Image (spheres, helix red, strand yellow):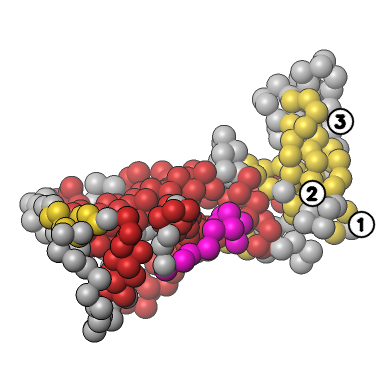
Amino acid sequence: MWFLNSYFSNIYIDPNNMTSKKLAKFKNEEEFQNFLALFANQAFQTIDIENLPKACSRRVVIQSIIWYGSVCFFKKAGEVLALPGLPCSDFTLNGEPTEAIVYGRNGYTEHIKLFIPNGDNSALVRRTTTGATAPVEGTGCWIRANYLAYPLMHYIINYASKCADTMRTLDVTRANIKRPYLVSAEESIVNSVKSFFNKRDNNEEFVISSGIFPADKISLLPFETNPENIRDCTMLIEWYQNQLWSILGIKAPNVVDKKAEITTDELYASTNIQDVNDGILLNTIQEGLDFVNEKLGTNMRAVSRNQSIEANDQEDNGDITTPNSAGAMAKSNDQKGDKE
């Protein structure tokens, strides 16, 4: 895989060619790759586009939104297609691109003219930075995943790096608890000592020594370990994941330290920011799809898979309300009683 940089693990570590450093780097890269793939695949499943034209690939549309922060819908040979697009040429009064270059994985590229939002009845809105006026008609529409067209993949890479580093810290902490000491040995027996500990770390029940560890050539230097570090690392990984899931619009369960005393309002304090994060992605995409629907004759709609699953669960289980919504209902009933 391209993240691994051709590093290969070797259980028998030779200190002379620094293989131990290569192995550690391999594990770091592998952990990062695992988290990156996990988070990216989760992101690809958070949203869906209903009524997507037959010639469009859902995977390409979603990947373009996640990787590039935008996607371009355009007409070609009587079909509506969707590909990643790079805005180019001039920009209009409202900062809309007038042209874009779309590209496919097989090397296909094409320079297309874009429809200008809010520009049908105003030449000033279509006026570009060079003083020219873009035409009313175009071939395609470039839509943003958010107002900044900022790729969500940047967040995914960032949190994948944080989680991978914390997970590797957890591995080291666990190893230190299993082996709470430093080994000091003469250079002549380093490889024999490493072979012994490799077998022990491999959880072999019996490790037979041939007497190669003379007392005057090897010593153990103990150091203090704290088992609570494992709990701290585990909670930090969960916190990082929840932060990313919130950005992606995935409603994660509230992670609460049972030792902490919190109120119900504090437990549900993140509800409003979750709604904002949901809107950053869905509302902006739908705004762009409405423009595409108008210009290209489609009927697309952006939906949250997470919200759809949650709605189905509530429908199957009956009305389910949070404490906040239950309180609002009670207040509404009180007000109704007062009016009566």
Q: Which residues are magenta?
A: 1-11
From this viewpoint, which residue is outermost toward the top? 131
Q: Secondary structure at mark 2?
A: strand
Q: Secondary structure at mark 1?
A: loop
Q: Nearer the viewer, mark 1 or mark 3?
A: 1
In the figure, residue 116 lies in which quadrant? Answer: top right
Q: Position of residue 8 (x, y in %)?
A: 53, 63
- Res. 75 in view: no
Disc 1 crowd, CA 10 A, few/some/many (<14, 14-19, 20+) = few
Q: Nearer the viewer, mark 3 or mark 2?
A: 2
Query: Looking at the image, which is closer to me, 162 or 283?
Result: 162
Q: Residue at x 27, y 74 (%)?
A: 200
- Pointer 3 or 2: first along the chain: 2
Amino acid at the residue labelled 3: Pro
- Pointer 1 or 3: first along the chain: 1
Q: Which residue is mark 1?
A: 77
From this viewpoint, which residue is outermost toward the right? 77
**Residue 182 is one of the magenta-drawn residues:** no
- Res. 79 in view: yes
Task: Report the disc number at residue 41.
Answer: none
Disc 3 crowd, CA 10 A, few/some/many (<14, 14-19, 20+) = some
Q: Residue at x 74, y 52 (%)?
A: 83
Q: Is residue 244 left or right of residue 269?
A: right
Task: Report the disc number at residue 103.
Answer: 2
Q: Is residue 19 above or below residue 132?
A: below
Q: Residue at x 48, y 53 (%)?
A: 17
Q: Is residue 257 above or below residue 309?
A: above
Amino acid at the residue labelled 2: Tyr
Q: Nearer the viewer, mark 2 or mark 1?
A: 2
Amino acid at the residue labelled 1: Ala
Q: Which residue is mark 3?
A: 135
Q: Is residue 277 left or right of residue 187?
A: right
